[in-house]
Amino acid sequence: MQSRPIPIDPHRRLERQVADKSNEIPAFAPLLDTLDLTHTVITADALDTQHAHGTYLRERGAHYIAHVKANHPGLFDRVRRLPWREMTLVHYERTRAHHRQEIRRLKTAAFDPIDYPDAKQALQVVRWRRDPATGAQLAAWIRGHWTIENLLHHVRDRTFREDDSKIRTAALPRTMASLRNLAISVHRQDGHTNIAAAFRQTARERLRPLTALGITG
């Protein structure tokens, strides 16, 4: 397969307006009509893997790499069921950049026919990526855990003495836990950081809970 790059003026962007309530599919051919596609290799997103696009590119003398995904279930299933385990690995690449490790494996399968214009070869690309957590991320996750503990569970354990509760019947323990969470949340939204002090104040002002809930003025 021969290919040549399409010359691109760095000061010129090739764009086409997509109509409202539409997508890029109708704009595919009109956009490329302005270019000489002979012996070029055109790649596009899976949305543009359309039979009409494949036919258009071949008629213009271009080759293509069409991404096949589940938006074309028949074609996707046909390609997926090829005996990939028996295929030879033709490319392997392992890279590391920006604290991220990536492994890419490529296999090819030549077969005929396939339900796509002039398609003679299928490619399988498998990629693994690993993003090791940094020290700052680990510390943030730990802080996040203890923030939840301090804002909710610690209050339920120490202020409500939830573990000492004698309520055990049916769904009542879950109901009481929900009511405790509601009370804590209402006081937090009301600007209180010390929930025990907020409850003592509420005990002295019997209408305060209703006011906080917006039930009475």
Image: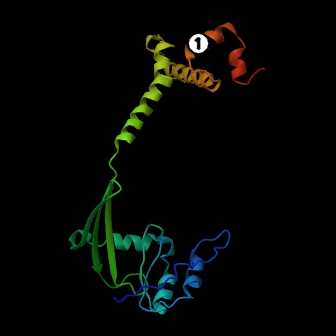
Colour logic:
rainbow
Q: Residue at x 32, y 48 (%)?
A: 132
Nearer to the camera, 79 or 18: 18
Residue 19 drawn above or below residue 142: below
Give the quadrant of residue 123.
bottom left
Q: Residue furthest right?
A: 217
User: Where 108 sits versus 184, above or below?
Assistant: below
207 above or below 28? above
Three-letter code, disc 1: Ala
Q: Is 57 displayed left or right of 100 in the figure? A: right
Quarter of the picture containing the C terminus is: top right
List x then y, in percent, for residue 178.
55, 24
Q: Quadrant of residue 12?
A: bottom right
The residue positioned 50% from the left and 24% from the top of the image is 152
Nearer to me, 22 or 151: 151
Residue holding disc 1 = 197
Name above or below for residue 139 compared with residue 187.
below
Residue at 50% across, 78% down? 50
- State the image coordinates of residue 199 (x, y, percent, origin top left): 60, 13
Q: Is residue 72 left or right of residue 188?
A: left
Query: Measured from the top left, where is residue 170 in percent x and y?
Result: 48, 20
Q: Residues within 10 Å of mark 1 (few under 14, many from 20)?
A: few
Tag 1, which secondary structure?
Answer: helix
Q: Is residue 186 left or right of residue 145?
A: right
